[in-house]
Amino acid sequence: MSYSPELSSVLKSLQASNGDLLRVISSGREHVGTLMPHHDFSDPDVLVLKLKSGYNIGIKVSADDDVSVLERAARREPPRREKPAAEGRKRVAIIGTGGTIASYADYRTGAVHPALSAEDLAASVPEMADLAYLDPKVLFSIFSENMEPRHWQELAVAVSKELNDGAEAVIIPHGTDTMGYTAAALSFMLGEIPRPVILVGSQRSSDRPSSDAYSNLMAALRFALEQDVAEVCVLMHSGPSDDEFAVHFGTRVRKMHSSRRDAFRSMNVPPLAQMKDCEVEFNAPCRRKSDVEVTPSIELQKDVLLLQYYPGMHASQFSNLIGSARGVVMSGTGLGHVNRDMVGLISRAVYGGTEVVMTTQCLSGATNLGVYDTGRDLINAGVITVMDMLPETAYVKLMWAMANSDDVRRTMTTPLQNEMGERREMHV
Amino acid sequence: MSEHELTCGIEIHQQLDTTKLFCSCRSGLVESDEGTFLRRLRPTASEMGEMDRAALLESQKGMTFRYQAPQGVSCLVDADEEPPHVADEEATDTVLTFATMMDARIVDEIHFMRKLVIDGSNTAGFQRSALIAMDGRLEMNGKTVGIQSICLEEDAARKVDAGDGEITYRLDRLGIPLIEIATGPDMHSPEDVKEVALRIGTLLRATKRVKRGIGSIREDLNISIPQGARIEIKGVQELRLLPLYVENEVKRQRMLLRVRSMLQERGALPVATEPVDVTESLKGSGSKVIRSALKSGGRAFAVRLPGFAGVLNGEDGALRLGAELAGRARTRGVKGIFHSDELPGHGITEDEVSSLRQSLSLEDGDAFAICAADEDKAVAALRMAAERANEALQGVPEETRDPLPDGGTRYSRPLPGAARMYPETDVPPVTVTQERLQLIRDNLPELPDETIRRLVVEYGVNEQQASQIVRGGNDAAFERIARTLELPAAAATVFANTFPEIEREGLDVNAVPDDDVLRLFQMLSEGRFAKEALPSLLREMASGKAAEDAVSSLGLSSLNEDEAEAIVRKLVQERADFVKEKGMAAAGPLMGPLMAEMRGKVDGKAASELLQKAIKELLT
């Protein structure tokens, strides 16, 4: 909500802007404070003032109340900062997509500003700037829930350029909501890479002292520089403590909690590596660093659906959608099941040329369509099974496979970037 | 003290008895230390984007925190693993009620702020706080005390351990709602301070929504005297000590002003702050402190304090600048310092003192301070001490001090600067509607004076007892017992006399839940024990026992008639000669031993009757 027309005109006539010192006399009491930006959830008739004590208060102001400007806001220039030296140091590209690495709050206005330039970063995270030359670029700045496949493509191009220009590593701060999708997409699109690409996020905003942004970024930087790994990974906390991190294969990782720092988990396999302070323990083999040139395949067949099966889902509701889509990834129940009605629809869609891939909404465990009748019917219907691949990863891989392979079935069923496997350990 | 000689303001933080402010955990303290995790807090860049590298390094050293998250009283919100929920309505209503009682101006929209705190006591690195009302007033004894602000905020986690570069906190206390009431600097005597604090406490208790017991209320005092400075004494928990803290602080500031004049008369100049290595002079010292420090690889340092002799500890302890120097020094991690006014002593000999004075080129009238510890710490500690000595030349420095149990205080840290606050955007602002305010006005709690009057009229309690019951915040419990069990006299005695007595012994009897006290009285009315046993039982319950357990642990159970008669008869037989000699008059003297024997299992009146009966039998 914004200001009411009455309040807007009062402020306009005074030419009052945010940061100006105002005096407001309302209901017989006087308040002096700095005008704060209108809060989205504030009442339209309410002015927010920052008092001398630092507290913000909301005061209802009507047209007959006395409002005056005591002092205009002073213009404050941010200080000039030196660009850090680049020669002789390893260059780590930091490609911003919208998740902020470092930010600071302006206590005068309450606004939170991201640190965007190399100078900003060197000033905000000096201990990291000591380890390598941090070279930030802002590719785009959007909430990750608004990201689309075309953003993944842009990102893949930018990342391969950095790697081919000799960057020691590429670190990508990313919103946590869809970080798993982007990581999977980059894994397939980039293919063989010479050095690591690490996505990091923060579950607690970086303007606050407890933010996990810094420790995640620092861990990512150390991991990239000190370990012989050339994979697309996601690095986040592995527990509530700030000294333990997990590095996940981009194709195996999923956000499994809405808010905890350790929300990201590798599904069906252990994380690639576990870090505790400076110690790193690997759980799996991986690609090593090399000099290979990146030749990305960024084409995607975007006409693919990801659907979660639920009891009550009927062919009549979905026949147009599924019938006309080029590809569908179903997240079925249990070993990969849907109801009879849907089996019929899937069969018709496959016959009509739609690729259908089956995964399990259990997320853990592999699909197996050979065990029950429903499964066998689905096999006969022409569904592609992909072992223990996550539904989200299958969605991304199908888009990529359909645009980059002549034999989609073969590509989907062949492990390419650690996204699926034959074995799952028994953990007691 | 006349009106102008002392200016004091207080800030009261009272825990509210509702669920936590930003989540639905119940608010209570527990003993469990389960569920620990580790965090580091990063100081955020200043508003212009600067990160002070020195500050960053400094902070990285000390800032590892361990948090214990006990079940039931802490959750993901407290662990900063989930965003805060909307502010608790009951807590908000309680603050609005109190603001209305103080006739304060309530804001039209409540905005919660993040107040940066990076000592680890808040997991997010900030405390959430909102200003609810301003410019209220409290009328007392014909005087008006301004209530400058009333805020609603969350309590901090409590420190349970501190070790090497690591502090451990428990999250049970984090998030408990606090009402913060700040008065204006309107008090001018120690008695004023106590009366105002008492009055505010009583009015808060009238809302029936505040927690009871030790630690549920904390007071900060702001004191200054003319030519002195504003000192904050933070975290006083015992109300009755308030006047003592005020008096002692006035004394301390006056002492410092005297020290300043003395130093000025002597022409003392600012001292050099760089310490000098004097390990050689103290190598062979017999002082335990010095020897142990040197043995573990430390060194001894000294600073010259020309002109400071006699003010560090002089005039028979009246002048004590030395204690202030030591207070600053200790913030650098050393156990303490020695200064020349207390030497020779502490194992340091006259000869060693002479040798030091010589090597430091000191004259009569000059003082020095020494410190033996790990080199970096000793040097830093003495620098702090020297800086404090220089501040003494100006007068009284502004600072925050910690209260000590004996009524004294010690240096804690510099006065905080303007708090860095910015909006808590995860919690939406709350509109204070006219409807809500009207509901609150229509339901204001009964004021203490009315309650006292009513207790006198309805229950026949005398005014003094009624007053004490209300002051102690026990009127609700009293009424329940008086009404449902018809035991007003016993209840009045317990609340008006027994409770304060037990409190004075240092036991937390106010933390015993009302339901438990009611249970105790129920058992009394069932005849499970005699009323004489009440004080002992309450003492047991103050240590955490439930009423039933207290009764069994004291071995109390009702004595039936036969058992009681048997005890009486036995006693009378034992004292047969005495009884024959005194006749019925023996009853009086024998009551003492008899009651000791009965140990509260029989009512005094009943015991006396049995005794008289038994004596009569013996005599016939």
Image (cartoon, coloured by chain):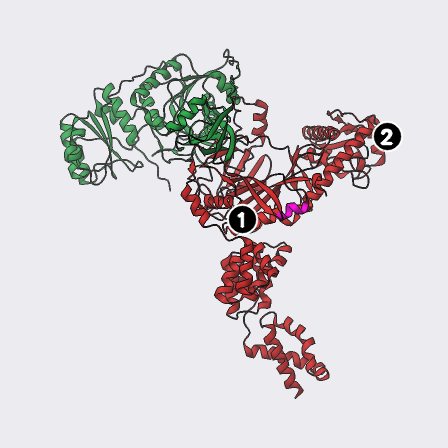
Q: Quadrant of the C terminus of chain A?
A: top left
Name the secondary structure under disc 2: loop
Q: Quadrant of the N terminus of chain A?
A: top left
Front: mark 1 or 2: 1
The location of residue B22, given as percent across then percent down, is 45, 41
Residue B306: quarter of image: top right
Q: Residue at x 59, y 49 (%)?
A: B199
Is residue B611 among what the camera can see? yes
Name the secondary structure under disc 1: helix
Disc nearer the start of the sequence (1/2): 1
The letter of the red chain is B
Amino acid found under the numbered disc labelled 1: Leu
Residue stretch rendered in magenta on the structure? B190-195
Please report, as a chain letter, where disc 1 is located: B
- Check residue B364 in the rendering and tell me which mark sits there, or answer none: 2
Q: Residues within 10 Å of mark 1 (few under 14, many from 20)?
A: many
The letter of the green chain is A
Q: CA distance from mark 1 to mark 2?
A: 58 Å
Please report, as a chain letter, where disc 2 is located: B
Q: How many marks?
A: 2
- Report which residue position mark 1 lands on: B204
Residue A340: quarter of image: top left
Residue B437: quarter of image: top left
Q: Residue at x 25, y 38 (%)?
A: A333
- Majority SS type along the magenta span: helix
Amino acid found under the numbered disc labelled 2: Asp
A285 or B537: nearer the viewer: B537
